[in-house]
Amino acid sequence: MSIKVMVVDDQTLVREGIKSLLSLSDKIQVVAEAADGQQALDEICLQNPDVVLMDIRMPIKTGIEAVALINQWEPDSQPPVIMLTTFDDHQLVMQAMQAGAKGYLLKDVSLETLVEAIETVHAGETLIQPAITERVLQGLQGKQNEFDSIETPEPLSTKEVEILRLMAAGCSNREISQAMFKSEGTVKNQVSNVLAKLGVRDRTRAVLKAIEQGII
Amino acid sequence: MSIKVMVVDDQTLVREGIKSLLSLSDKIQVVAEAADGQQALDEICLQNPDVVLMDIRMPIKTGIEAVALINQWEPDSQPPVIMLTTFDDHQLVMQAMQAGAKGYLLKDVSLETLVEAIETVHAGETLIQPAITERVLQGLQGKQNEFDSIETPEPLSTKEVEILRLMAAGCSNREISQAMFKSEGTVKNQVSNVLAKLGVRDRTRAVLKAIEQGII
DNA sequence: TTAAAAAAATGACTTTTGGCACTGCATTCA
DNA sequence: TGAATGCAGTGCCAAAAGTCATTTTTTTAA
């Protein structure tokens, strides 16, 4: 029994393309489509899809409005909605999630990933990607979520900035220790301090944050 | 005899979708694809498509840059290029036209329109306002930017780009594995491949390189 | 249908990272 | 004097990252 999917996107080429693509999978059956949020609502009632793939930016009724309205229906008649997004959409994506979308995927995703995501939400599970792609969407100049933003931007000492610069140059702890004539253990401690002050958990993010904030 | 078409778009879903869609028409045969301008140039040499459909906004080399470079080739080896654009972005479109594109289409067109557009440019005509555009082209084809990438960076596969983007979002291997519905071991292998192809030794450098080259 | 190729997974392994607790040392300031 | 602070170092530990060889699965092509 294949999963009944509905595709909502205002761009004909994209919508038809995704339809055509999904038709290659025998696990998926595209049973409906729509070019805007309003049409989507109507079609869902008519066709009862198992899963809805919905673009965010659409005329008449946006994907966000559509999701919000779907969420007011009786739980049994609510199909899970996966938002399809581009890199430009971060704010909208968060709105959509709050409105009740079950997850979102970048359009930059492979067919296999898409199919697996559809299967996942159809099985009643939540897409894990949201928490992750959020950061992709936010990109380099992303803003923090509310919890992080309470952070006191704890100032880095001169040495810590030096360390951070070397980290951002791609140096390993050992290389940093050699560059700064310190023991590797000391460097590790310093790196830990930097991570803590920046509120991140590993050096990759520290570097990203440093670039973000123009520290380097 | 069908028209050999190449599809260039960085968003996998869109690219594959258009490919799949075009395959429905027996007038069209998709013989190649690419995810960025650089790949596009390589593929054109290899596959000799009759017509190229190209997105404007892409990493590494934009559609505009790619068109500009194609236009430096010998006239016989220049396939006509149709730009695909998401929004009505006059600025970029005009740049692309000046760089030598034969026309542009919004992605919001039907399959039939797309096919007709392909046939049109394949017949040697220009898509929009031929008289005017043609003149504009004549006047502005002298100046070219010459940035040749001497290094041939080994091209990343679709999945590898997906991985790299997640890496650049600060995701751990485990998070990536969850986002892509793969095992952590597989992700480690893939990450290793990405590192090798980028010629770097750890993920921090990979991310830095990705940022440098605009992959993310 | 079978063979070859690509993608995915596994397991064993080494290195790197990051966290933590604790010591020592020098400087500053009340 | 002594408490506080910042910097350096040590040792230990667990987790994550990265490498490699190999197997299994899936896809693709012949």
Image (tube, coloured by chain):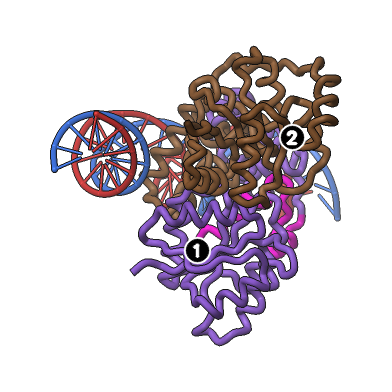
Chain colours: A purple, B brown, C blue, D red
C4 and D2: which one is in front?
A: C4
Q: Measuring 67% from the left and 73% from the top, which residue is drawn there? A: A38
Asked if badges 2 and 1 are on one and the same chain, I answer yes
In the orientation shown, which residue stands out farthest toward the bottom?
A74
If the image is split into quadrants, where does the N terminus of chain A sit?
bottom left
Q: Residue B110 at x, y = what percent?
A: 63, 52
Please name which of the two marks, 2 or 1, marks the residue nearer to the observer: 1
> To which residue does mark 1 refer?
A127
Q: Is residue B175 visible?
A: yes
> To which residue does mark 2 refer?
A216
Label 2 crowd bin: few (<14), some (14–19), many (20+), radius 10 Å:
some
Q: Residue A58 at x, y = what percent?
A: 70, 62
B125 and B162: which one is in front?
A: B125
Q: Is residue B212 visible?
A: no
* Label 2 element class: loop
Q: Residue C12 at x, y = what percent?
A: 24, 40
Q: Give me the disc on residue B79.
A: none
* Label 1 element class: loop
Earlier along the polypeptide chain: callout 2 or callout 1? 1
Magenta region includes residue A135: yes
Label 1 crowd bin: few (<14), some (14–19), many (20+), radius 10 Å:
many
A29 and A100: which one is in front?
A: A29
* Image position of B60 with respect to B171: above or below: above
Part of the protein shown in magenta: A128-152
